[in-house]
Amino acid sequence: MSESQFKKLCIFWSSETIQSISKRNTQSRATQKWRHRMGPKTFAIIRERMVIH
């Protein structure tokens, strides 16, 4: 990533709108009961293995 891109990204992250979206998303993730714990395996791979076995 170039220095100019990084500066633009820092400005983007520091904006009020993005900060409020980030806060809302953090609160939403905190309320999730079940978290994704499959690692690099996709649901398609798991489904295929379940059908075969």
Image (cartoon, rainbow, N blue to C red):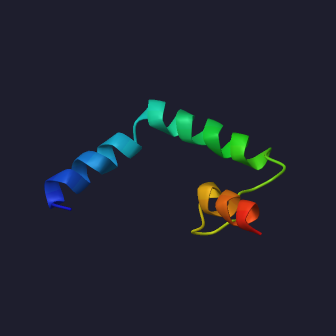
Residue 6 lies in what quarter of the image? Answer: bottom left
Left or right: residue 3 compared with residue 34: left
The answer to whether residue 37 of the structure is visible from this angle is no
Seen at 71% across and 40% down, the residue is 28
52 in relation to 18, above or below: below
Q: Looking at the image, which is closer to me, 25 or 33?
A: 33
User: Residue farthest to the front?
Assistant: 52
The number of numbered discs placed on residues in the rendered structure image is: 0
The answer to whether residue 21 of the structure is visible from this angle is yes
Residue 16 point in image, percent of width and height: 46, 33
Residue 12 lies in what quarter of the image? Answer: top left
Left or right: residue 1 compared with residue 38: left
Seen at 21% across and 62% down, the residue is 1
Left or right: residue 29 compared with residue 17: right
Q: Report the quarter where the C terminus lies.
A: bottom right
Residue 29 point in image, percent of width and height: 70, 46
Residue 39 point in image, percent of width and height: 63, 69
Left or right: residue 29 compared with residue 40: right
Q: Looking at the image, which is closer to me, 7 or 30?
A: 30
User: Residue farthest to the top?
Assistant: 17
Residue 35 point in image, percent of width and height: 75, 56
Seen at 57% across and 69% down, the residue is 40
Seen at 32% across and 50% down, the residue is 10
Residue 41 lies in what quarter of the image? Answer: bottom right
33 in relation to 23, above or below: below
User: Residue farthest to the right?
Assistant: 33
Q: Looking at the image, which is closer to me, 45 or 42?
A: 45
